[in-house]
Amino acid sequence: MKAIKKKQYVIPIIICLLALAGMMVYYLTGSLSKSGQSEYIYIDDNDDIDSVAAKLAPIANEQALLSFKLVSRHVGYSKHIRTGRYAIEPGEGIFRVLRKLKNGHQAPVRLTIPESRTTDRLAGALARKLMMDSLSLSILLKDSTFCAKQGFDTASIVCMFVPDTYEVYWNTSIENLMSRLKKEHDKFWDSSRQAKATAIGLTPNEVCTLASIVDEETSNNPEKPMIARMYLNRLAKGMALQADPTVKFALKDFAIRRIYHNMLNTDSPYNTYRYAGLPPGPIKVASVAGIDAVLNAPNHSYLYMCAKEDFSGTHNFASTYSEHLRNAAKYTKALNERGIK
């Protein structure tokens, strides 16, 4: 009788233990994420195990998250937290996730270099995508010693940034990022582009400077080569470029919709109405389309251009000043009729 009673107790205990073991296996090997798609968490250098768990909480199964906290402490992850951007995939169990986090197996960020108008804006845009301080990056881009080491000065350093999309790690250092972008710049300026720049009598930095002006003149890529040749024609004749976007840059007011005569006297080396030749550096990060427009500008004899009166974003070109004045009068009339000041 006693043996029978013992069996009556033992069997339920065994069943409970098996059930408990099954639950543990389920939560330890089952998916940590409750999402059906890739999710990403960003771990900073001030994170601890609790804050990492808090970042996982919105995407994690509740019981799996509790198991994650328990196991992470036993495998030593809490003492070896590594910064980075990590992908949490559907179906990944906590052991796989922990191995990824502990070993620093990050998912790269697709970083697109924006066509920013100032180094401060450029630094801010990059810092928003990376674990990076925008002020530190901005200061670096204004450091003459750093710029010289890259082959630029503080006015031309933006030439190093070729607007494209690159895969980098979210926690990459400023130094590593700059090194990577310099390599991408050198790759972009291959022998073909170098030869084209030489053929038009410009250095790569000068090409970028002119391209930045062309970019600001129009967003219409098919028209950019025409505008580029017009400016090349003016440079060849020793004429001032007289580019309105350089006046906006000199005034640091990019919201100006209409350039008035008094603005043309702004004393700045970037004001191409007051100073002949190219400005000291680009007025924005030049686009690839703008750069190639300068390098492949078609031959024509135009020396002047004026925005079309239909506000299409394209321009009327002229070879003579009298023709240009007629085009300018039509555009001024259109501005006045629309009340644009």
Image: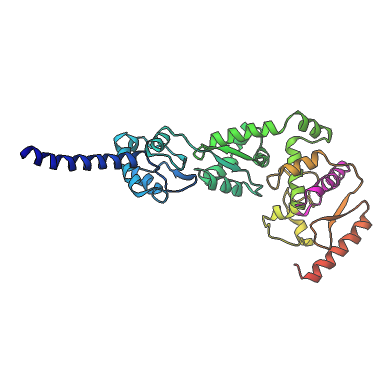
Quadrant for the N terminus, please: top left
Give percent across and percent down for residue 43. 43, 42
Specify whether 36 is left or right of 294.
left
On screen, residue 176 above or below 16: above
Mark yes or no: residue 105 visible: yes
Mark yes or no: residue 145 visible: no
Specify whether 17 is left or right of 173.
left
Quadrant for the C terminus, please: bottom right
The residue at 36%/38% (across/down) is: 29
Residue situated in front as seen by the camera: 16 or 77: 16
Magenta includes 149?
Answer: no
Residue situated in front as seen by the camera: 134 or 9: 9
Q: Main secondary structure of the magenta part?
A: helix
The residue at 37%/36% (across/down) is: 95
Residue situated in front as seen by the camera: 180 or 55: 55
Q: Residue furthest left?
A: 1
Task: Find the magenta span and give its range.
Answer: 219-244
Specify whether 7 is left or right of 318.
left
Q: How is the image coloured?
A: rainbow
Give percent across and percent down for residue 25. 32, 38
Give percent across and percent down for residue 335. 80, 66
The residue at 84%/41% (across/down) is: 297
Q: How many marks?
A: 0
**Which quarter of the figure has residue 187?**
top right
**Which quarter of the figure has residue 66?**
top left
Magenta includes 238?
Answer: yes
**Which quarter of the figure has residue 102?**
top left
